[in-house]
Image (cartoon, coloured by chain):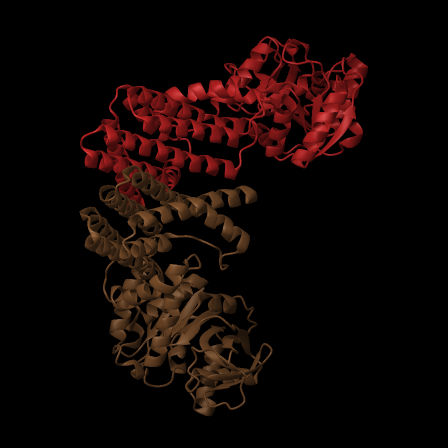
Chain colours: A brown, B red
Amino acid sequence: MKCLIIAAGKGSRLKQKGDCKPLIHLLGVPLIERVIRSAIEAGADDFYAVSGYQGGRVRAFLDDLSACLRIQITHIINKDWEKENGLSVLKAREHLHEPFLLIMADHLFDPAIARKLMSFSLDDGEIALAVDEDTQNPFINMEDVTRVKTNGKKIYNIGKSLSDFNGFDTGIFFCSPAIFSALDQSAEKQNNTSLSGGGRILANKSRFKAVKINGLFWIDVDDPTSFHRAENALLSNLSKHTDGFVSKYLNRPISLRISRHLFLKTDISPNFISLFSFLLSLLGAFFFFLGGYASLVIGGILAQVSSVIDGCDGEVARLKYKSTDFGGWFDAVLDRYADGFLLFALTYYVCVSNDSFVLAFFVGFLALIGTFMNSYTADKYDGLMKQKLGYEKFYFRMGRDTRMFIIFLGAMVNQPLFTLALIALITNMENIRRVFVLYKNG
Amino acid sequence: MKCLIIAAGKGSRLKQKGDCKPLIHLLGVPLIERVIRSAIEAGADDFYAVSGYQGGRVRAFLDDLSACLRIQITHIINKDWEKENGLSVLKAREHLHEPFLLIMADHLFDPAIARKLMSFSLDDGEIALAVDEDTQNPFINMEDVTRVKTNGKKIYNIGKSLSDFNGFDTGIFFCSPAIFSALDQSAEKQNNTSLSGGGRILANKSRFKAVKINGLFWIDVDDPTSFHRAENALLSNLSKHTDGFVSKYLNRPISLRISRHLFLKTDISPNFISLFSFLLSLLGAFFFFLGGYASLVIGGILAQVSSVIDGCDGEVARLKYKSTDFGGWFDAVLDRYADGFLLFALTYYVCVSNDSFVLAFFVGFLALIGTFMNSYTADKYDGLMKQKLGYEKFYFRMGRDTRMFIIFLGAMVNQPLFTLALIALITNMENIRRVFVLYKNG
């Protein structure tokens, strides 16, 4: 599927974020790269990019991206980039002789929108627009958005100043080559070179269709407010349905801030963050070994900080499109070693500071084995729960976030033996519960 | 696909194993059930069973099996079961008007044979026979087998007394209804009511085809020798390519004998065997806790015995068609707990009997975490290796069999600290190696 991407404009309302709008980094990735990756995920594989303002920089970036993603990106230059956006579309005329996806470099979108649009069966001479009818959509800038008037699948009118409207232009089109002659006509007859002008010509011929995408995410990143909203939307998307209570209300809100303001502004790799979180845990374990309440407190804090940072690797990986199978597995392996060292060190702390050595030894072992087995049984349990309940549903899950938080609290109140006993109890109980759940459903 | 199964004969040469041949248990499962399950695996789903000798017992068993496997089994009664087997086939005439699979209740076979046979495109009036050309096949009783003379896809002649032959009749046919009139003709013209007689009629018309299945397993279970060979074949099939060195040369040969002579003769479930092996490990751990060399030796022996028994659950499950997802997972979870308790108890043994408590404590912990992580990383590592090398290839794998054997040997020679140190070293080294292997190939 061919995809035409318009990246010619200047975007002066975002100039505080960077001079060349398509290349402005949003959470560590240029806007145009996010848009192209969404289009690829939806099924596009042959790109035509119209550049204008700072075109050299845009084209250099796209050449790198093309090599990195192994896709074809053909450059189209629009020297009239200061005029309206219909001209940018017209420059692509000679390349596009069959239906194509038309997107804007500054409109982020859920790939599901493009997929839905491309599955619309276009008749000859038609174009289709993804239309959002949600008047409460918090990501729409109501003062600047292009409005549309639809009835069923038909679009009757389009324009920023419509007073009678019932939907919004998402900037994502599925076009037959008829769009080019419509733009010609709009320029000739109405002296209007905007994409909306061409749309109105087709609307008058009943050749402009609406595909409703209500509820799916899209945003026109046009000014600092929408930029900020887009960041928030992408970040809030990172919370996982497997996040436990502690993760959801404590760790995740903090880790998202750390990712946003620290890691995403650097080139630090997710695996390096995993390693860093692991080393923090090791340092925490070292303090437990030293003995004494002060060390216990420092160790507990380090364990909890490590647990928070442990969320960042996945966040950075997903936001920067760096998720790998190995990365997720490596993180899990390091977490298990970190769990092991922390519990072992805490057991040691209790063994040397407590009279009942045997009790401490035994309780520490049960906490260790219970914790390991919690992780060991998690895959199978999660698998069953997803299969039974679907991916989005909540289900009970006692995870690492909770265990680390208990260690942190236990260290603060100087109750290491009680902490180990509590962890031993809840992890092993949870493991036995999982065996029964899986037996009943196996 | 319809399947006709001949289960009418008496099988007097196997009478020491049981009076009703189709119901004779081979490794815990009646012959006819093994044959039906192979046919189901190959794609048959509508069965017609011809019973004769002790037909009431056979039909009662098949009714139970039909309910249990949720398949249709229609009974056909042959009162002339003492005569030749062609008559049993003829009794099914009214039920079979399209191509069907024809099998014998006493011929075990690899489902791949039936699959290959059923993918042969039968012309009108033809039948096809799975033919084995392997004259060295150790599962063939050369004195009793029916011989065939083929040329390419054609069968020229068939009979037990052929002197010019180049293949063997496996007893697995794919027939069009033409078989019935051929059997009629053979009976009328040659007074021969055997299946081979019908085959010869069709061979003379060039309507008898050969499908070569060289290398695939099948066996006619006809006398005590072939019964024993069939048992050995099924048992040797149970060794897994993931079996490590200790498992392959020590544990598996013993566990196969225990399964064969003990568990397969009872109704003990695989999950119960898993639990029994787990309890043996717990008992071993208990002896380690007691302290003293004698207890150490008993604990070590119990650990090794538990490790051997740990192979039986899977063997029994596979031989009795009782493999479940839950069973495999439950076994793995119990193994991890057993590993944990044994290493913990051994660490305790060393801690209380050794001067350098801290060293013992630390080494024990490293052995414990290394062991857990060995199991934790195994799935991913095995997955990669299978993907890279294919399922059958050998690759290096330090598994539970080796760890348990080291504990056993270490206990025998009274070197528990050295044992823990060795396990700590090799398991953690192996884990680090796996991380690098997966990183390089991720």
Q: Residue at x 25, y 80 (%)?
A: A16
Q: Position of residue A98 (x, y in %)?
A: 48, 69
Q: Residue at x 50, y 77 (%)?
A: A132
Q: Residue furthest front?
A: A355
Q: Position of residue B321 (x, y in %)?
A: 57, 30
Quadrant housing residue B128? top right
Quadrant housing residue B362? top left
Between B79 and B431, the one nearer to me in the picture:
B431
Visible in this render: residue B32?
A: yes
Between B156 and A269, the one nearer to me in the picture:
A269
* Image: B412 above or below A415: above
Q: Residue at x 31, y 57 (%)?
A: A409
How many marks overall?
0
Between A262 and B149, the one nearer to me in the picture:
A262
Q: Position of residue B274 (x, y in %)?
A: 47, 30
Q: Position of residue B173 (x, y in %)?
A: 65, 25
Between B373 and B224, the one nearer to me in the picture:
B373
In the picture, measured across the screen, residue B393 lies left or right of residue A157, that is: left
Quadrant housing residue B388? top left
Q: Quadrant of the N terminus of chain B?
A: top right
In the picture, measured across the screen, residue B256 lies left or right of residue B10, that is: left
Q: Residue at x 35, y 74 (%)?
A: A50
Visible in this render: residue B396?
A: no
In the picture, measured across the screen, residue B389 lies left or right of residue B24, that is: left
